[in-house]
């Protein structure tokens, strides 16, 4: 087996391992939490980058194998550092969720879809990231609010949204 074939087989194996890690990576997720360079994603990316650059250098240049090995290890480390700091680290700190709590909707503006009677309950609809959400509501000061009015959610008590008719601030006055 030539050294070029060895780089190629390592590249194929790591490609297959990476695909398997994408599907079954939750099992090994906690391994790299304490020490970032032991993260399986970083290790597999390093081996993949090093083998890919080694394969390309073996097939495209006339350098000796030791020079190619050292160059491919340096290139793999460089690409790995770039991958870690430009993609993996920012993505690990990103918090994206479409989940919400009733309390997190306080301060939002909704629209009345079932009129709210005085001392009674109606229904409002709120537009969130995950779509439209309808909730039971009552007037904050037990006031009546008609259909189609925009309301401001003041607070949430026992699953009931206490609202007031929304009056946008006019900067022109």
Image (cartoon, rainbow, N blue to C red):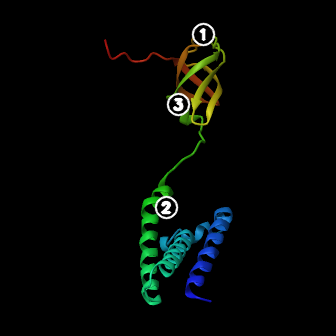
Which label sits on residue 106?
3
Q: Nearer the viewer, mark 2 or mark 1?
A: 2
Residue contact at pointers 3 and 1, CB within 8 angstroms = no
Q: Nearer the viewer, residue 93 or 1?
A: 1
Which label sits on residue 169?
none
Q: Residue at x 57, y 23 (%)?
A: 162
Q: Nearer the viewer, mark 3 or mark 2?
A: 2
What secondary structure is marked by label 3? loop
What secondary structure is marked by label 1? loop
Which label sits on residue 88?
2
The quarter of the picture where residue 125 lies is: top right
Crowd band around label 1 with a 10 angstrom C-alpha radius: few (<14), some (14–19), many (20+): some
What secondary structure is marked by label 2? helix
Q: Nearer the viewer, residue 93 or 117?
A: 93
Q: Which residue is mark 1?
A: 146
Q: Residue at x 41, y 72 (%)?
A: 78
The quarter of the picture where residue 118 lies is: top right
Residue 149, compared with residue 41, is above or below; it is above
* Dot placed on the residue nearer the N-terminal end, 2 or 1: 2
Q: Residue at x 50, y 82 (%)?
A: 58
Disc 3 to disc 2, C-alpha distance? 33 Å
Q: Could you say where residue 38 lies in the image, as x and y percent from the top left?
A: 52, 74
């Amino acid at each position: 087996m030539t050294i070029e074939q060895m780089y190629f087989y390592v590249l194929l194996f790591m490609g297959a391992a990476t695909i398997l890690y994408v599907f079954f990576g939750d099992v090994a997720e906690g391994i790299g939490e304490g020490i970032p360079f032991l993260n399986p994603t970083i290790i597999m990316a390093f081996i993949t980058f090093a083998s890919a650059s080694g394969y390309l250098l073996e097939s495209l240049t006339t350098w000796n194998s030791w020079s190619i090995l050292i160059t491919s290890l340096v290139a793999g480390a460089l690409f790995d550092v770039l991958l870690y700091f430009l993609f993996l680290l920012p993505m690990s700190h990103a918090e994206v969720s479409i989940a919400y709590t009733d309390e997190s909707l306080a301060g939002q503006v909704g629209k009345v879809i079932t009129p709210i009677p005085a001392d009674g309950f109606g229904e409002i609809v709120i537009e969130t990231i995950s779509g439209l959400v309808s909730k039971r509501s009552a007037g904050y000061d037990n006031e009546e609010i008609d259909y189609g009015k925009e309301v401001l959610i003041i607070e949430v008590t026992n699953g009931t949204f206490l609202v007031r008719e929304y009056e946008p601030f006019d900067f022109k006055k």
